[in-house]
Amino acid sequence: MLYLIRHAQSEANQNRIMASGMPYPLTPAGHADARRIASEFAQNHKIELLISSPLVRAIQTAEPFGEFFGLPIRTDERLKEQDQGVFSGRGYDEIKTLSGYEHRPLARWDWLPEGGESYKMVATRVMSFFQEYSEIFKTKNVLLVTHAVTFRLIRGLLENTLPTYPEGFPNNGEIWVVNFQGLGWVHPITSLFYGDSRNFIHNP
């Protein structure tokens, strides 16, 4: 079984900042929530492999899962958040006033922020990651820890809709469950809500 979790609340989430690939850590509440989510998850599920984005907010979310399941955290650059280039580290309210930013979430496939990545570029690295681990995902219980935009594109990949992808993405700490069959399949995706992931955390 394949499980995917969006990192818990980060300082960027709390302060409405475009985190991009920057090293924003979890808030104290995010740390506590990650541990609570891992504890509740471990009561009913088992994982054999733990793979995280190398960004600090993802690593900090992965750590309690590693402790509960006795697993090392394997990191992979291909699970990082989209690099928003010149918009990285800026507040969402500020970004709304800047020219050059693509405000339509569903129009970002080919949009390339200066110094950053397009959705197409993120999807390419996500595709590479899934191609490498495809057989492992079919046979082991694996947890991936990643980010909002990356989740959008992973969902498009799992539902076989790319270059079309969903407008929404999971709450911080929300877990997706997928019975992975292989690339090219249309996978049903189920959400698990533990800890504060039951609450809606808005990120434009």
Image (spheres, grey):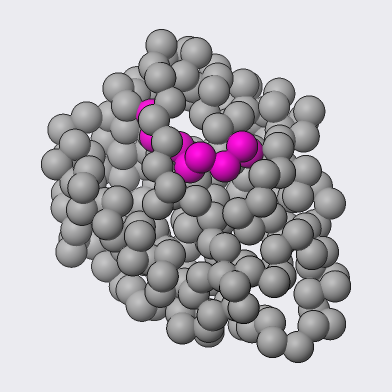
Front-lying residue, 190 or 17: 17
**What residue do we see at 48% from left, 58% from top?**
150
Which image quarter: residue 8? top right
Please, is residue 80 above or below residue 95 in the view?
A: above
Q: Nearer the viewer, residue 185 or 107?
A: 107
Q: Is 32 inside the magenta-drawn segment? A: no
Task: Decide if residue 20 is in sight here.
Answer: yes
Note whether 92 is above or below 19 in the view shown: below
x%, y% of residue 100?
Answer: 69, 87
> Would residue 114 appear left or right of 203 to someone viewing this image?
left
Q: Which residues are magenta?
A: 50-57
Q: Judge left or right: residue 146 versus residue 17.
A: left
The total number of labels drawn is 0
Q: Is residue 43 visible?
A: no
- Residue 160 vs 31, above or below: the answer is below
Residue 131 horizontal/vertical position (percent)? 20, 53
Residue at 57% in and 42% down? 55
Decide if residue 34 is on the left or right side of residue 13: left
| Residue furthest to the bottom | 99
* The N terminus: image quadrant: top left
Q: Position of residue 172 (x, y in %)?
A: 63, 44
* Residue at 60% across, 77% down: 113
In-image side of 2 versus 102 (left or right): left
Name the residue located 69 percent from the left edge and 71 percent from the top edge.
86
For the C terminus, the image quarter is bottom right
Is 107 drawn above or below residue 130 in the view shown? below
Identify the image quadrant of residue 70. top left
Q: Position of residue 158 (x, y in %)?
A: 30, 58
